[in-house]
Each structure stands twice: as C-alpha cells, then as structure tokens.
Image (cartoon, helix red, strand yellow):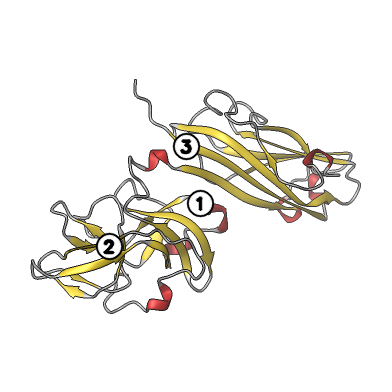
Amino acid sequence: MALAAVRAPHLAQKDGGVVTPAKIERIVRNGVQVWQGGMAVADANGHLVPAGNANGTTQVLGRFEDSVLGDGTLRARVEAGCLWFNNSGTSIAVANLYDACYAVDDEAVHLSDSGGTRARAGIIVDIDATLGVCVLMSPYLFVGGDKAVIQSRARTYGHADLTAAAFTQAINLGAALPATAMILGYRIQLNEVFAGGAIATMDMQIGDDTNDDDSLCAASDMFTGSALLALDWVQGTRGVQPNGPPTGTQLQVLFTATVANVDQATTGEVDVEVFYQDIPSFL
C-alpha cells in the first residue's frame, strides 16, 4: 500500500552498506504528494512523483529526502544508496540476491516487473524478515538498460531438499533465464559433504532442463569434496559455451547418488551461483 505519511528514516539506510554518491533535487509534479522515505521516479517532464505512479519512468531514482506537496515550483531531494523497502507478497527470497527488483508503489518492491509495467527499483542486496528488502538503487545503475548488468541465479541446497526415492534428483536454480541471456560462469561452495544411509557417492552437476544437464558443471564430488579444493570456492570456466545454455530455459542442479537413493542423505549443504548477462541481439 502506498505511503500516507512520512516513512521512518531508520527504515531507509542500510548500516554499513554500499552507498552510491548520487543526490538530485527536482521539482515535484504539481498537485502530487511525495513522502520522505518513499521511492522516487520522474515523469516525462522530469518532475518527481512517487514510484508506482502510472506516469513514472522505468527507473527508480532513489529515496525522497523531503515530504512535499507539489505546486509546480517546490522541489524535493532524492538520494540513492542501499535502502530498505517492503517485500511485496514476500515475492523476494534469499535465492534472489543480486537480481533486479521492481517498485509496486513507493514503499514496496517485487521480484516481478508485472509484464514491464513496474519501474526498476534496483539490485537486491539483502533480505530481512523485519526490515524487508535492501535494494541498491541509483539513477545511474541501469545506464544503457538493465542489459548491461551482471546478474545471477543463486541457491543453497541442503540434504533436506533431496526427497527423491531415486538415484537422481533435479532441482531448479531460480527462475528461468531471459531468452537473451548469456552465461558468464558459475561458482560452488560445498559447506558440508553429502552422506547418509548406504550412499556410496554423491555428485552434482549444473545445466538446463531442456538439452544438457551438465552444460555448466559436470559431476562435482559432493561426497568427499575432493573436486572442490577442500571445500573452497570454485570459479567456473569463463564464457561457458559461446552463448551459454539454450536461451530462455530453466537452469537446474542435478544430484546423483550411487548404491542408495538421494533421499537417504542426512548431511550436506552446497551453495550454487550462476552468473549471466541479458544481452539483446542486434541482428
């Protein structure tokens, strides 16, 4: 729901977070109320309005530093940075860190752009059950469009996620990639080896659900961790395939056990992140 009063300042700034040194001051549209702490966008004339306004641009500029009822001359200050806003519909989860998010109104963000009708708020940098979503926002963040931003799909998989009474189980890695996505690489961190029951080995590979289930990562050892350099980060091959997996498909992580089914695992946790850019064709 849109603001009807001043938003508490302590909800605005992420302590110790990255702050983009960008401040602007512009005229508030005549007859429009803006509230301190709300998200700001500009209309076609460059006048400030609250995010969520149908006449706003596609990019959130930052957070209002003033509460102003516009008369055609009054101005308001807007500051960018790492800022907390409400998690609309709890649509944003830890798996969405470093993805873009979108303004539902001037105090809430959502993972979906609702068919391109919502302004881009910024990049998700933190999530808290009480504070909501911390968003890195700046008027310059999407210069040239969000196509220039390196994005990722990330998730932590634990033994409790392995529920298949079978030797293999494929689990999605976030939402499907855009149709014009190019894979840049990946990284893995094995926090705890997977073991339990009669399982003799456990491998994990990363690919897509359509053509190639190990197009990014083939059979990394989750049972002893020997393939992960003593449980350390592993950087995937840069530019995996010239154009990454088939575009617009769903990334998946495939777990494979031997001797016993994967659901017998009683220990195990691994972090997986795949980096990509959304790059349109110029043909």
Picture disc at residue 40: 2
What kind of element bears circle 1?
Answer: loop
What kind of element bears circle 2?
Answer: strand
State whether residue 90 is above or below residue 274. Answer: below
Q: Is residue 254 left or right of residue 116?
A: right
Picture disc at residue 98: 1
Percent coordinates x, y for residue 105 in the rendering: 31, 63
State whether residue 221 is above or below residue 95. Answer: above
Using the numbered discs, state the Cα–Cα distance from disc 2 to disc 1 in whole angstroms.
21 Å
> Do callouts 3 and 1 mark residues in contact (Cβ within 8 Å)?
no
Using the numbered discs, state the Cα–Cα distance from disc 2 to disc 3 in whole angstroms.
26 Å
In the image, what residue type sits under mark 3?
Gln
In the image, what residue type sits under mark 1?
Tyr
Q: Earlier in the sequence, mark 2 or mark 3?
A: 2
Using the numbered discs, state the Cα–Cα distance from disc 3 to disc 1 in whole angstroms.
12 Å
Q: Residue at x 53, y 44 (%)?
A: 152
Q: Give the residue number, with chain letter if any, for mark 3.
A: 277
